[in-house]
Amino acid sequence: MNVSSESVRSEDDVKQFLGKRFLFTCHICHWTYTTKLITAPQSVASIVHSICVDGRAASSRFAHLKNYCRDKIRYEKQLGHYGKHKQLESPQKPRPPSIIPDEAMSDSSSFQNSSSLVPLTQPLCCRYKTRCKSCRNPLDVPSDKPFSGKCTQTACAIDCIPRIVPSRPSNVHAEGFWVYGRTVTVLINVLNSYRNPINVTISTISDLDSFNTNKVRFHLPCREFKVGCIDENSNMKHLSDYVRTIPTSLLTNFSYVSRVELTNRPLESLEALTPEETGDVFRSKNGVARPVDSGVSWCTVAAEVTVERGAGNSEDGVVYIPLFMAVESDDGQRISYWVKLELPKRGR
C-alpha cells in the first residue's frame, strides 16, 4: 500500500497552512482512500487507527466481524473445556452480526464513492533457504529481489560426491567389460570434484558373501587410496586445464590438445595402462596394492570381474556391481553411499 500526503492552504491567503490530507492507494487493486483534514501532527499509525474507529458503516462492519470471529474461537475453546465436566454450563454461542441496515446503505456520507471500499486481500508467500542437515551449509538461496521467485544453488551433490567411471586397458580389443567364464581386467576411475583432497575406501558385496555364492565376482586389490583436487587458485581458463582433469585411460588422441597431454603424462603410467599380460596392471609396493595411475583430481585402480552363466542381472547384457564408497576429505567432511557400477557386455 502506498501513502502520499497533500498540503492544504487557505483560499484567501496562500501562505496560511491549514493542514494535510493523506491518500492511501493499493498497488494491487483500485482501492483509494482520502483522510479528512489533519491539522495536528500525527503518525501514520494514529491516522489509520482513527479511520478504523471513526464510526463509518464499513469500519464498524469490519469491527463487528472481527469481534465475532474472536468470540467464536473463544467459544470453541471453552466448549471443549466445559464438555469434559457435565455439571458445568456451556457458554452462550455467539451470534453472527446482522447485515448492514438499509439506512446505513442509503447514507451518502458513509460511502462517498465505490473507491472507499476495503481493498482486496492477497495471499502471502515466503521464501527460505535450504540447508544441509549435516553441515548446515546453504544449498538453495532465494533471490534478493522481492518480485523474483528464482533460487541460486550454492552446492549440489555432484560438487561433493566423486564420480566413478569404468574403462578397459588400452591394449585390450574387447567389445565390452566382461565375458562369460573369463576373468576380465577393469579400470575404475575415481574423479574428485570437491574443493579438498579426499580419502576413498571401496567395499564390495563379495567381501560380505562368506559362502561364495555370487555368480558375479569382483576383486579389487587396492581398496583405500587418496585422490587430489583442483587448486583453488587455478583459473581454468584454457582447454588444456580441463584436459588435465581427465584420467589417462579415458583420454583419447582425437584432438591436438589431448595428444599433447598424452605425451606429457608419465611413461610409467602409460606402461601400466598397456600391460603385456593381464596381471601386470595390478601394481604393488612392499606387498601393498596401490593405484595404477593418478592425476590432479583423479585416481585409477584396477579390478578383476568374473561373470558366470546364469547371473541374475546379466540378462540385458549389463552387469550391475554395487560398491560401498566411504569418502573423507581433509577438512573433516565424511560421507558414505552406495554406487551401482554399470558394466555393459558390449562397448558403447
Image: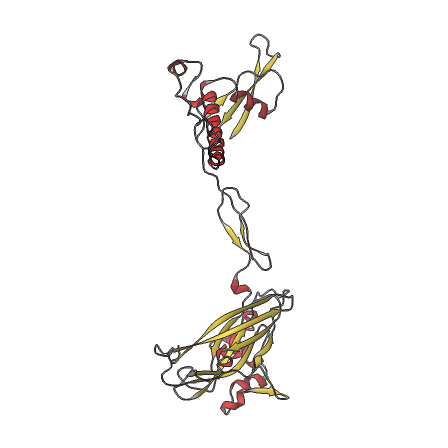
Expressed as whole percent of the image width and height from the top left, the position of residue 333 reads 61, 65
Work out whether residue 318 or residue 210 is closer to the camera in this orientation and state it: 210
Q: Which residue lies furthest to the top in this view?
A: 12
Can residue 5 be seen here? The reply is: no
**Residue drawn where x is 60% and y is 77% of the image:** 225
Between 83 and 78, the one lying in front of the other is: 83
Q: Which x, y percent locates residue 320?
A: 42, 76
Rendered image quadrant of residue 291 = bottom right
Displayed quadrant of residue 117: top left
Would residue 315 appear left or right of 86 to someone viewing this image? left
> Which residue is found at the position 58% from the left and 17% from the top?
38
Residue 53, position as x, y percentages in the image? 52, 20
Most distant residue in the bottom direction? 277
**Closest to the observer: 67 or 203?**
67
Task: State the residue at coordinates (64%, 66%).
Answer: 332
Between residues 36 and 239, which one lies in front from this camera angle?
A: 36
Task: Pick out the residue farthest to the left.
Answer: 315
Question: Which residue occupies the extreme front position in the image?
Answer: 87
Q: What color scheme is it?
A: secondary structure
Please tell me which residue is depicted at 53% across the width and 77% down the height of the picture. 203
